[in-house]
Image: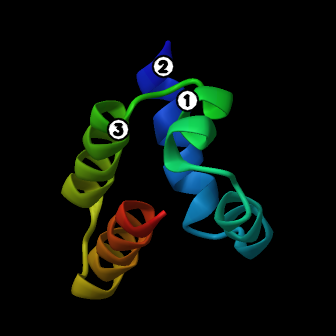
Amino acid sequence: MAIGKAMEFVKQASIDKELRSKCNKSESKAELMKSMDFTEIEFDDAINMRLVKCQTYEQAEIYQQLKLWFLQL
């Protein structure tokens, strides 16, 4: 299930600096998403699901920054 893979990626990328560094070295966002086996829409859905669970602004800020980072890839 691709949304599950996107959710796991969001969870890991929010805490794993090494994973983000690896993603930054990727040839393109399309290549990265293909290797991770999810689409940009599924990524957005995963971010939104995480945002709904946030209890504080600080938690939400982490996922908002992750979303912006992903857009810049």
- The residue that mark 3 highlights is 40
What's the residue at 57%, 49% (across, down)?
28
- The residue that mark 2 highlights is 2
Residue 65 lies left or right of residue 34; in this view the side is left
Badge 3 amino acid: Glu
Which numbered disc, 3 or 2, marks the residue closer to the eye? Answer: 3
Tell me residue 15's x, y (percent).
Answer: 63, 70
Residue 33 in the image: above or below residue 52: above
Mark carried by residue 5 = 1
| Quarter assignment of residue 21 | bottom right
User: How far is the residue under mark 1 from the one under mark 3?
Assistant: 12 Å
C-beta proximity under 8 Å, tags 1 and 2: yes
Residue 59 lies left or right of residue 69; in this view the side is left
Residue 24 in the image: above or below residue 34: below
Along the line of sight, the residue nearer the viewer: 25 or 4: 25
Badge 2 amino acid: Ala
Tell me residue 45's x, y (percent).
Answer: 26, 38
| Quarter assignment of residue 12 | bottom right
Tell me residue 50's x, y (percent).
Answer: 33, 53
Q: Under tag 1, what secondary structure? A: helix
Badge 1 amino acid: Lys
What's the residue at 59%, 28% (across, down)?
34
Residue 9 lies left or right of residue 24; in this view the side is left
Determine crowd level at label 1: few under 14, some 14-19, many 20+ residues with C-alpha closer than 10 A: some
Determine crowd level at label 3: few under 14, some 14-19, many 20+ residues with C-alpha closer than 10 A: some
User: How far is the residue under mark 1 from the one under mark 2?
Assistant: 5 Å
Check the image and name the residue furthest to the bottom: 58
